[in-house]
Amino acid sequence: MVPLSYYLLLSGILFACGVAGFLIKRNIITIFMSIELMLNGVNLSFVAFAAHWQALSGQVFVFFVMVVAAAEAAVGLAIIIAVQRTRETLNVDQVNLLKL
Amino acid sequence: MTPNLHLWWIPLLPLIGAAINGLFGKKFSRQAVVGVALTFCGAAFAYSAYIASRFSSLAIPYSETLAHWMRAGSFQVDFAFYLDQLSLVMLLVVTGVGFLIHIYSVGYMWDEGGFYRFFSYLNLFMFFMLMLVLGSNYLVMFIGWEGVGLASYLLIGFFFLRPSASSAGKKAFIVNRIGDFGFLIALFLMLKHFGSLDFSRVFQGVGPMPVEAGAAGLLTSIALLLMVGAAGKSAQIPLYVWLPDAMEGPTPVSALIHAATMVTAGVYMVSRSHVIFERAPMALTVVAVIGTLTALFAATIGITQTDIKKVLAYSTISQLGYMFLACGVAAFSAAIFHLMTHAFFKGLLFLAAGSVIHAVGGEQDMRKMGGLRQKIPWTFWTMTAGTLAIAGIPPLAGFFSKDEILWRAYQASWIYWLIGLITAFLTSFYMFRLWFVTFTGEYRGGHSHAHDTDTRAAASIPQGGHGHGGVHESPMVMVVPLVILALLSFVGGWIGIVESMGGGDHFDKFLGPVFRASAPEVNAAHTVPEAAPPEQPSEGPEPHTSPTTELIFTAISVIAAFLGLGLAFLLYHLQPDLPHRIADSLNGLYTTVLNKYYVDEIYAAVFVKPLIAFSTNVLWHGVDQNVIDATLNNSADGAKHVSDSVRHMQSGNIRSYAGWVTAGAAAVIFYMVWLGVRVK
């Protein structure tokens, strides 16, 4: 049995990687992936707790998060395609005018 | 029950006049301005005269309440008016002399700029002065008190383009504030201990209190503080310095405000508060000493002045000193008597001096006058009446009032009497000096001067376009008030002739109810009857003096007056070069007196300069700049520096925002972890 703390540590590392990627990277798609990474880091802690406490609510929560993440991915990718089409770049530093 | 007299109309009428002239006068013609000013001032006088005519049928003291002013708990002040014999005398003097001076001003100010402004201020002054004398409580009196100070300031600085005039106005205002401070503290003390500022309520509260013979107590404090106020308003030592400078104002103003009415407000106030003063012998002594010293001090300065108005100004201070001497020996009715006669003859003297100044084209230096007797006969004869009256030559007004004061002073202490007598001699001397120098001998002004006046008037802002070429008599509108006042100066004293001289002493009897009302209560209530105030103002009990003694003293003061006349005749008519030689032989003393004992310089060195230095270095550079301004500037600078450093957070770069969010979140997490660790 893997102890709970290992999961939590991994979850924290994933989340920190996501944050770091979000802050450092300039490519929108990479940033988008970093956000997904953060979400999944959190998901991992949810399921770890669910397993630890033998409670289903944590896992149910993860489903919700995945649904939202999927929806977000759909919308986000659509935006990214739109940005790429008009600006011909995916560098966030050049997409800072809050308009297309 | 006395019908409602509507006393409030009396002060209100001049206020309406002041408002009309002040607001709309600029568009009026001169005739219209005069019409408005004289109508309302004359109406106030007529109404006062009407009340005086009905006076004997009234229930006195009469009081009426116009409106509530302020109420806070048990403390209540009303706009209330009060009429008794004392107020009636003041009322008639103020409106009567005031009205005459209004008429005179028409002629005197006709060619001046700001004609409407002058009459507006003059009416405003009348309003405040009437509030002062008619108020039924100390606070209404205080409104008038401050208001006449304001009107005085405005009128002294009437020729405000002349720096000396505006600074004289400021000086008068500031010196008066010192006195008003004392007055105000006295009011607070009364409020604290008697719970009211109404004359009747305060005096009721004072009534049962014992005479503070041994130690100074509450009443002595109140009385002394009131005296501080009176000394400021009435130009007594040590606060007299503003009055000579106040001569910068137009001459009718000097006559009305700085001789006849406003400066006597202090005497009125002390007399009104006689109930308090009578129970504070120590304060009375202070009043008497201040009055005596001021009388002598100012008279000596008056001898050396060469400006005709300055002589009269010092004379006014000196005569006010007489009035305070009378108050100080509890001879209040004598003080008010002298106040009244002084209003007549000093008003007359100032107006006549104004007429002289008018005649010689704005010149005020007596040394450049002389020989004016034939040229301006009306002015000459009226001025003669005034001079005789102030010098105390019988049977003119000043003689009776001054004599009564000297007699009463003698009953208190022979020192008062002696100094008063010396002052009477000096008064006679400097007044006849003025008279001889101005009216006899040769005209020393020169003709070029009279021709120069137009250019001079155009070049500066002097006391006006008085020069119309050559010495000339004043117009009728100025002469008539002079004549009326001269008649009053002549006969005005007859109502107060004392019994020893075969008179009825009517004035003292008339004022009797005011000043004697409180006396029986004193004796009944307090435990040491012997410690009664020195010399209650009652004409009856003067057991150890006979009318003969009184007549001898009268003779002495008349002799003193004639000695002054004779000396002035000798020095300034027979041997005009003698004064210079005397002055040379008394060089140091003469220079000291000529420079008014350097009092202004001493005040400048002791009070003004240190105050300015303190204000500049400590209050301005220290507190204001280094504390108040510095606090403000440094907090502004600090905010700017902090903002400068943190504005880099607001870069507009999304990722840096995200970084800050992350950093904030990290900080919160660390804090929570730290909390968790600590709990364990």
Image: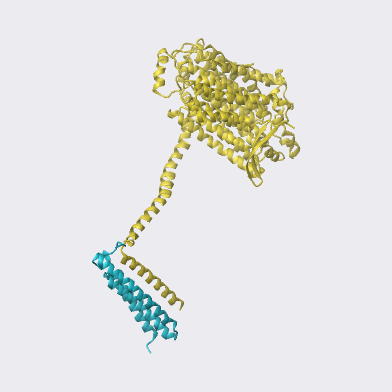
Quadrant housing the C terminus of chain B: bottom left
B203 to the left or right of B359: right
Task: Work out which residue is located at the far left of the displayed protein and give it.
Answer: A88
Name chain A's colour: cyan
**Nearest the camera: A62 or B147?**
A62
Chain letter for the part of the structure drawn in yellow? B
Q: Quadrant of residue B494?
A: top right
Figure coloring? by chain
Task: Work out which residue is located at the far right of the displayed protein and give it.
Answer: B524
B277 to the left or right of A91: right
Q: Residue at x 33, y 74 (%)?
A: A73
Horizontal and vertical percent for residue B376? 51, 12
Name above or below for residue B222 compared with residue B120.
below
Task: Work out which residue is located at the far bottom of the displayed protein and give it.
Answer: A1
Quadrant housing the N terminus of chain B: top right
Name above or below for residue B625 compared with residue B167.
below
Q: Quadrant of residue B341?
A: top right
Horizontal and vertical percent for residue B396? 63, 17
**Nearest the camera: B27 or B38?**
B27
**Nearest the camera: B483 or B339?**
B483
Horizontal and vertical percent for residue A91? 25, 67
Residue B369 visible at all: yes
Q: Quadrant of residue B128?
A: top right
Tally the marks. Answer: 0
Residue B414 visible at all: no
Name above or below for residue B370 compared with residue A42.
above
Horizontal and vertical percent for residue B675? 44, 74
